[in-house]
Amino acid sequence: VKDTDAYTGNDFYYVGGYRFDTPTDVTILSKINGIPVTYIAEGVFKNCEYLTSVTIPDSVKEIYDYAFLNCKNLKTVTLGKGIDFIGNCAFYGTAIESITIPGSVKTIDQDAFGDCKNLKTVTLGEGIENIYDWAFGYTAVESVTIPASVKDFNGSVFGCCYDLKSISIADANE
C-alpha cells in the first residue's frame, strides 16, 4: 500500500478512499511516515477479484464493514494481534480456507465470514466476547470451539453450515 492509498487523522492512518483493482498479495503497512495504520476502511477492497492474500499488521484495530466483500480469490488472511473489531460482511464471499482470529478481537460482527464456502477451519482465540448472527453462516466449517470469554453468541452464528459436526463450548462459559 502506497502513501497515496492511506489517509491520516491527527495521529493515525487508515487504509481507504481508493478502490484497489489489481493487487494479488497485499501486506498492509503498520506505519506510514511514522504514524500507525489503525483501521481498514469500509469497502476498500470490495470485489477485488485479483486479491489472493492479505496480511494485516498488529497496528490495525478495526476492519470495517465490507472491507474485503466478494474478493472471490482471497484464500489467505493473516490477522494482526491488535485487531479488536471485525465488521459486518468484512470477508463475506471470499475463498478463505482457514482463519485464526486472535483473542484481541472483541467483536465479530454479523456475516463477517458469511458465505465463505471454502472455510473449513476456524480457530477462535480466548478473549473474543461477541459473535453475531451468521458470522460464519454458509461456510464449510466442520467443528469449532467457543472460548470461555464469549458472552454473546446465538445459534445462527453457524447457520446453514451443513458440514458442521461439533461445537464445543468451554466449561467456564454460561
Image (spheres, rainbow, N blue to C red):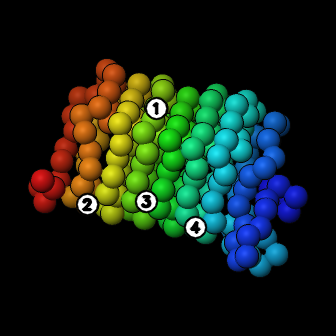
Q: Residue at x 57, y 67 (%)?
A: 58
Left or right, 163 with respect to 36, comes to: left
Whichever of callouts 1 and 2 sits on the residue coming sooner in the sequence is: 1
Q: Residue at x 55, y 58 (%)?
A: 62
Q: Residue at x 88, y 58 (%)?
A: 4
In the image, is residue 22 above or below residue 140? below
Whichever of callouts 3 and 1 sits on the residue coming sooner in the sequence is: 3
- Which amino acid type is shown beneath numbered disc 4? Asp
The quadrant in which the N terminus is found is: bottom right
Distance (Cα) linking label 2 and label 3: 11 Å
How many numbered marks appear?
4
The residue indicated by pointer 1 is 114
- Which amino acid type is shown beneath numbered disc 2? Ser
The residue indicated by pointer 4 is 58
Whichever of callouts 3 and 4 sits on the residue coming sooner in the sequence is: 4
Mark 3 crowd level (few <14, some 14–19, many ≥20, 10 Å Cα): many
Mark 2 crowd level (few <14, some 14–19, many ≥20, 10 Å Cα): some
In the image, is residue 15 above or below residue 117? below
Distance (Cα) linking label 4 and label 2: 21 Å
The residue indicated by pointer 2 is 149
Q: Quadrant of residue 28?
A: bottom right
Q: Secondary structure at mark 4?
A: loop
Distance (Cα) linking label 1 and label 2: 22 Å
The residue indicated by pointer 3 is 105
Q: Residue at x 45, y 35 (%)?
A: 111
Q: Nearer the viewer, mark 3 or mark 4?
A: 3
